[in-house]
Amino acid sequence: MRDIIDFYNQISSSFEESLKERTPDEIAYDSVVIKELRKGRSIKKALRIAGKKYPNEALKYNDGNIDDIYAHYDYLLNHELIKAKIKQISN
């Protein structure tokens, strides 16, 4: 099991580093988007809700970039779930 955890930590290390570069408002905005996605909302709806709460952080999206934005947040959501499971297993 330790090998799997180490491997995941290795392949996600650059993503983890990019998360450390976010401002507190960016983190709050991302948290709202993730919360809304967990509720089953679409990415566009989640972005609109987060944008109302954090207008200065709101992402500009269109049909050309919405799939990339969704992919980022889907990865972030799954990354958070995996990290929570790792923490649970490690305790």
Image (tube, rainbow, N blue to C red):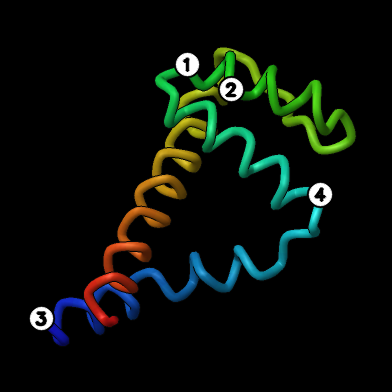
Numbered badge on residue 42: 1
**First in sequence: mark 4 or mark 1?**
4
Q: For mark 1, does the 10 Å Cα neighbourhood hold few (<14), some (14 to 19), or many (20 or more) residues? A: some
Which residue occupies 47% across, 16% down?
A: 42
**First in sequence: mark 2 or mark 4?**
4
**Which residue is the extreme one toward the front?**
91
**First in sequence: mark 2 or mark 3?**
3
Residue 13, percent across and down? 44, 75
- The type of residue carrying mark 1 is Ser
Numbered badge on residue 46: 2
Residue 70, percent across and down? 47, 31
**First in sequence: mark 1 or mark 3?**
3
In the depicted structure, whether residue 47 falls above or below residue 91: above
Q: For mark 4, does the 10 Å Cα neighbourhood hold few (<14), some (14 to 19), or many (20 or more) residues? A: few
- Where disc 3 sits, the SS reads loop
- Where disc 2 sits, the SS reads helix
Tell me the distance, in whole angstroms, between the alpha carbons under discs 4 and 3.
Answer: 35 Å
